[in-house]
Image (spheres, grey):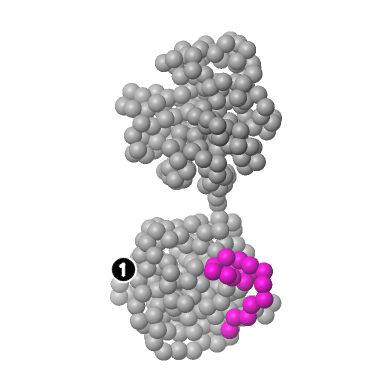
């Protein structure tokens, strides 16, 4: 599901008109202002949110969809809700200490909307609020200083805040916020590939991709010598007799190989580094972006595995020539690379586009 994006135009200044047009184009869920006049021309698809400086009057309340109430300034939320049953009221809480953190937990657990502002950069208080309101049906909207912080807020405690309120510094920030709010890697259609030959190809450099996450037993990364065909290499989650498991690692393949990353882009294994993103994929084609912690490149004997799809597409993968290096087959069967033989089935992915500096492009290209 996409996260909620709110635009704060209280400090937009001369750029307000342009920022509003960008927000409407990007389909933000709501725009927040201190003056209902700033919200008057919004289309009905955008929620009008009023956060007044002083106590709002009946006309101001009637002109908007949601009113954010700061109990320190405006009084009790319940009073407004009783007097104006047709308007939604949310509660604002600035979290600066333990009592205000408790207030935020109560608001998030009971209000239809809670707008939270955290004074300190630590995300531990937000974690506490999210956990306290886990069973609640309302929306937690958290103020973000910039898009980079919004991305972090969306991922706190894995669930993240329901939404983010951002006061953009420039045109373009809302576009980036919407990308962060909706960024969910798509599922991939994996196919069965039949091994047609394997051969020992001598020495070369292979890359182990160490990530900052635990892989599941049926999960790894897609790797291939060509952009139009990759094989699913499993992580080191399965026991080995001579070493402990390393469930964060994929012994992925030779350094020239492609793998998938953000926005359907490919990267060479050799260009990955600490902080890079790669696409983790399980046997059902479900995906998630994971962060690379390091890439370890070493000289090792290599083995070439060639497999073919039912449609005739030939896929190649060059791996370290050692039986503990593994790929995944149908139903998550773990296959040692050195024991693969013609007729064995492995799981793979067949992108349809060629590549230019990693980006998909429709052009004439032959890979061998």
Give the residue pinned by disc 1: 244
Of residues 194 and 34, the one nearer the viewer is 34
Q: Residue at x 55, y 51 (%)?
A: 184
Outermost residue, front side: 14
Q: How many labels, in total?
A: 1
Query: Residue 147 appears at what percent x and percent y?
Result: 47, 43
Q: Is residue 157 above or below residue 9?
A: below
Q: In the image, which residues are magenta?
A: 347-368
Of residues 30 and 209, the one nearer the viewer is 30
* Residue 368 figure quarter: bottom right
Query: Residue 330 appears at what percent x and percent y?
Result: 56, 70
Q: Residue at x 42, y 58 (%)?
A: 291
Q: Dot 1: within a 10 Å radius of its alpha carbon, few (fewer than 14), some, or many (20 or more) residues?
A: few
Of residues 183 and 53, the one nearer the viewer is 53
Label 1: which secondary element: loop
* Residue 246 figure quarter: bottom left
Q: Is residue 162 above or below residue 277?
A: above
Per the image, is 358 magenta?
A: yes
Left or right of 140 on screen, residue 37: right
**Which quarter shows the N terminus?**
top right
Q: Residue at x 60, y 24 (%)?
A: 38
Left or right of 121 on screen, residue 346: right
Query: Residue 311 appears at what percent x and percent y?
Result: 69, 77
Q: Is residue 26 visible?
A: yes
Q: Residue at x 60, y 15 (%)?
A: 60
Per the image, is 113 magenta?
A: no
Left or right of 60 on screen, residue 151: left
Of residues 93 and 110, the one nearer the viewer is 93
Query: Residue 293 appears at what percent x and percent y?
Result: 36, 61
Q: Is residue 156 above or below residue 326?
A: above
Q: Is residue 232 visible?
A: no
């Amino acid at each position: 599901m996409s996260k909620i994006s709110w635009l704060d135009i209280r400090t937009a200044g001369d750029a307000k008109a342009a920022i509003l047009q960008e927000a409407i184009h990007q389909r933000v869920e709501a725009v927040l202002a201190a003056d209902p006049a700033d919200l008057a021309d919004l289309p009905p698809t955008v929620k009008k949110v009023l956060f007044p400086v002083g106590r709002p009057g009946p006309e101001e309340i009637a002109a908007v969809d949601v009113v954010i109430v700061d109990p320190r300034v405006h009084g009790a939320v319940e009073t407004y809700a009783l007097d104006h049953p047709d308007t939604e009221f949310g509660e604002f809480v600035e979290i600066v200490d333990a009592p205000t953190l408790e207030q935020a937990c109560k608001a998030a657990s009971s209000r239809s909307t809670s707008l939270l502002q955290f004074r300190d950069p630590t995300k531990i208080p937000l974690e506490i609020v999210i956990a306290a309101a886990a069973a609640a049906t309302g929306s937690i909207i958290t103020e973000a200083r910039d898009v980079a912080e919004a991305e972090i807020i969306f991922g706190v405690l894995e669930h993240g805040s329901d939404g983010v309120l951002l006061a953009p510094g420039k045109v373009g920030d809302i576009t980036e916020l919407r990308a962060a709010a909706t960024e969910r890697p798509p599922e991939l259609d994996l196919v069965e590939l039949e091994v047609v030959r394997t051969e020992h190809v001598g020495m070369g450099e292979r890359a182990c991709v160490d990530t900052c996450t635990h892989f599941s037993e049926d999960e790894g990364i897609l790797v291939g010598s060509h952009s139009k065909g990759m094989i699913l290499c499993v992580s080191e989650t399965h026991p080995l007799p001579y070493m402990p498991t390393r469930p964060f690692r994929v012994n992925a393949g030779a350094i020239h190989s492609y793998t998938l990353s953000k926005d359907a882009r490919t990267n060479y294994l050799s260009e990955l580094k600490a902080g890079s993103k790669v696409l983790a994929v399980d046997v059902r084609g479900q995906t998630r972006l994971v962060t690379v912690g390091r890439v370890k490149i070493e000289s090792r004997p290599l083995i070439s595995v060639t497999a073919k799809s039912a449609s005739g597409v030939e896929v190649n993968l060059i791996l370290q020539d050692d039986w503990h290096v593994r790929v995944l087959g149908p139903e998550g069967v773990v296959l040692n690379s050195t024991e693969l033989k013609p007729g064995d089935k492995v799981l793979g992915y067949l992108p349809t586009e060629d590549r230019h500096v990693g980006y998909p492009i429709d052009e004439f290209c032959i890979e061998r």
